[in-house]
Amino acid sequence: MISRSTRKLITVVTQRQQYLRQQLSTSMQCRHFSASLGCFQQQQDSNVPPPTHYLSSSDTNSSVIQQHPFQVAPNPLNPLQGIASKPFDARIAQILQAPVAPLDVEVKPDGILYLPEIKYRRILNDAFGPGGWALLPRGAPKKTQTIIFQEFALYAGGRFVAQAYGEQALVSVQNRSIATAYEGAKSNALMRCCKDLGVASELWDPEFITNFKPKYLVRKFVKNVKTNQTSRLWRRKDRPAFSYPFEEQE
């Protein structure tokens, strides 16, 4: 429930800077669907005015707005704003669902295919324009002895698109800051949210994976010179041989 002081603050919000500050605090309270619906009811009861536009009316004739006509900001009191209200237009859908470029696909040593997180951001920027989408946290990050995880929601065109948990293993960032681990969890959540938009969906298609591996990948026997253990690892055919502490075996 929204406290009396918060309700009073909401009613006097008139400027964009105040609205954005309130958006952050309220979105943390409304991180679950059930809580979100409750917060939306509070909005109706208190007659909170709709959020202001990011852009003024004088900007509506610009080429940027004509290409990416998204002006209304996500409403923190209704985190599900616009969910499944209508499909994106054909131009956006074509960008999001475009076949993945084989040279963009990377492979982990265990053979799992993936697209670097920066590729997802570029696809979203191409589809919605920089500033036309956002990944918002739903609640504070959590940590166990082995992983960090946090829930995020993806908004595009001023409406809710998807939500997912992102995670990052702590064992892989032993020599990095905790902030780097949190950023890894955010990128992981972005990738999972983009699955709902069809971005790089081939990477979860068994037929695509089966055809991709023999054409672009190679599996090599490698020896870890530190542990003297031998294993088989995957890499792209166009990449150099594994480096220290691994040595490829012929």
Image (cartoon, helix red, strand yellow):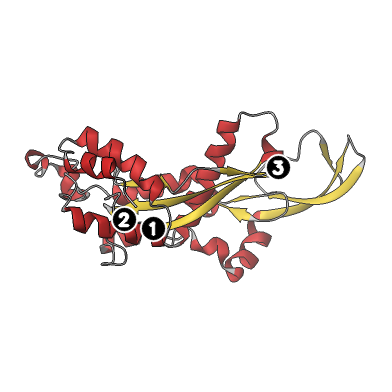
Residue 121 vs residue 39, the one in the foreground:
39
Front: mark 2 or 3: 2
Q: Residue furthest right?
A: 228
Q: Secondary structure at mark 3?
A: loop
Q: Residue 219 in the image: state x and y as whole percent.
A: 76, 54
Where residue 125 is drawn, which disc sits there?
none
Disc 1 + disc 2, Cβ < 8 Å: yes
Where residue 39 is drawn, which disc sits there?
2
Residue 204 vs residue 56, the one in the foreground:
56
Q: Amino acid at mark 1?
A: Ala
Q: Residue 153 in the image: state x and y as whole percent.
A: 41, 52
Q: Amino acid at mark 3?
A: Gln
Along the polypeptide, which appears first: circle 1 or circle 3?
1
Label 2 crowd (10 A; few <14 / some 14-19 / many >=20): many
Residue 30 in view (yes/no) = yes
Q: Residue 227 in the image: state x and y as whole percent.
A: 90, 38
The Cα atoms of the two marked residues, 2 and 3, are separated by: 34 Å
Left or right, 210 with respect to 77, comes to right
Residue 97 in view (yes/no) = no
Where residue 145 is drawn, which disc sits there?
3
Q: Is residue 228 above or below residue 128?
A: above
Where residue 35 is drawn, which disc sits there?
1
Label 1 crowd (10 A; few <14 / some 14-19 / many >=20): some
Q: Secondary structure at mark 1?
A: helix
Q: Secondary structure at mark 2?
A: helix
